[in-house]
Amino acid sequence: MEIIRHLRNGSFIFFGIISSASAHSPPQADAAANAPQAPDEVLFQNVRVFDGKSSSISAPVNVLVRGNTIQEISASPIRTATGAQIIHGRQKVLMPGLIDAHWHAMMAALPPARMMTAEVADLNFIAAQEANNTLMRGFTSVRDLGGPVFALKRAIDANMVNGPRIWPSGSIISQTGGHADFRMTYDIPSSGNAALSRGEAIGGGIVADGTNEVLKRTREQLMLGASQIKLAAGGGVSSHYDPIDVAQYTEDEFRAAVSAADNWGTYVAVHAYTPKSIQTALKGGVKVIEHGQLLDEDTAKMMAKKGAWLSSQAFIDNEYANPQAGENRAKQKQVQAGTDESFKWASKYKLKVAWGTDILFNPKMTRNQGALLTTMTRWYSPAEVLKMATSSNAELLSLSGERSPYKGKLGVIEQGALADMLLVDGDPIADIQLIANPSKNLLVIMKDGLIYKNLAE
């Protein structure tokens, strides 16, 4: 059965039970042309392992991958099937693929002016190129915290383009005048039947006021395939109309989003810096605080009591900071000044801490993704930093439950885990700076059992 719908411009669209496809289903590539061809088995011989959980590197072992899963780890020789690919590790270090828990796959490599004026097709082509670059930096998974990333994710999953696994949030949901209200002042006042702004139309952010609107916009993102929901709970650095101290959304509005997400078996994360914005979100049932650089001791205690995550970044005044100017630069300095304190409280109250980069609108900065990870040694040991970017971030990803787009264990090297792994030319615990130069130091990059880079042979 087909139904024909007449559109305003005179064109027609056909849809129905036979011709329709789920928004969650990836497009089908004829031969998955961009995916590397792999044998049924890959054996890493004579490698030392950082398993994502330990604080040291193992003695030499052999690791067998069958399909997309780690089949066996043994100090003894492992028998392989005929035609298995052998990678001679020569005691290099095999570690889990890195995970960036706060990435913007569609917005990291685009200047704001280009983002707001380019054709949507251009945005996707640029993002696809950056997705390949992301994978080549050793990041095999990313948690996308805002942007029109659903089509890119489907293309990666269908092996039409190369890139990391993506946990998408879709549009950032924002109150009027909030961090993800991308409208211009000339768009205000808005009428009830006003057209969507450019930022809303392309899926960057969507404005919702009141519990009913928040509920609707949350459900829309879940319908599109969001694995978690992102709300803006307070003022931002890069947004122009909200001071950093402004708290956004009420407890009831947070609770509406949380209820909708919970019904889908997933959770809500919020952009928030200040105690008031964080505490209001926590009271509304929010499980993950993004940033949190201005939190105080009472807020840290509250997070610990509720078991909330702090998904934070190394926001300090260094060469890796997102460039800002004018009032935004003043806000940035305020956030940077609070970073040391926030990690102090996180450590004291043993908060669950995840790490991400949050690179925005800067194509020259994305190459520093691994270098940004290394700056976390200001607060944590190299082993703790590497665990954060592997097993801890994987634990955060698992909060998506049934909405997780990928089934299986990530962030660790152990029998039965998914085969997302890096072979490093050196010991990243002894020298974490190896991660900052992936083109030189990452000899093998494997995602889902497929080898995307191999300099070991």
Image: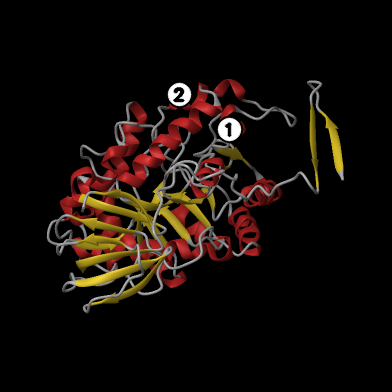
Whole-percent x, y for residue 106 in the image = 46, 37
Residue furthest out toward the front: 82
The answer to whether residue 226 is above or below residue 114 is below
Whole-percent x, y for residue 69 in the image = 41, 67
Q: Residues within 10 Å of mark 2 (few under 14, many from 20)?
A: few
What whole-number distance in Å separates the C-alpha atoms at marks 2 and 1?
13 Å
Whole-percent x, y for residue 19 in the image = 76, 44
Q: In which quarter of the image is the N terminus?
A: top right
Q: In this view, does 303 lie to the left or right of 383?
A: right
Label annotation for residue 114 = 2
Label annotation for residue 202 = 1
Q: Is residue 274 left or right of residue 26?
A: left
**Is label 2 in a helix, a strand or a loop?**
helix
Residue 269 seen in this snapshot: yes
| Foreground pick, 380 / 374 | 374
Whole-percent x, y for residue 386 in the image = 26, 61
Label annotation for residue 396 = none
Q: Residue at x 56, y 43 (%)?
A: 29
Q: Which residue is drawn at 67% across and 28% down?
A: 190
| Foreground pick, 256 / 17 | 17
**Is label 1 in a helix, a strand or a loop?**
loop
Q: Which amino acid does label 1 sit on?
A: Ile
| Foreground pick, 247 / 207 | 207
Image quadrant in which you'd find residue 391: bottom left
Residue 273 seen in this snapshot: no
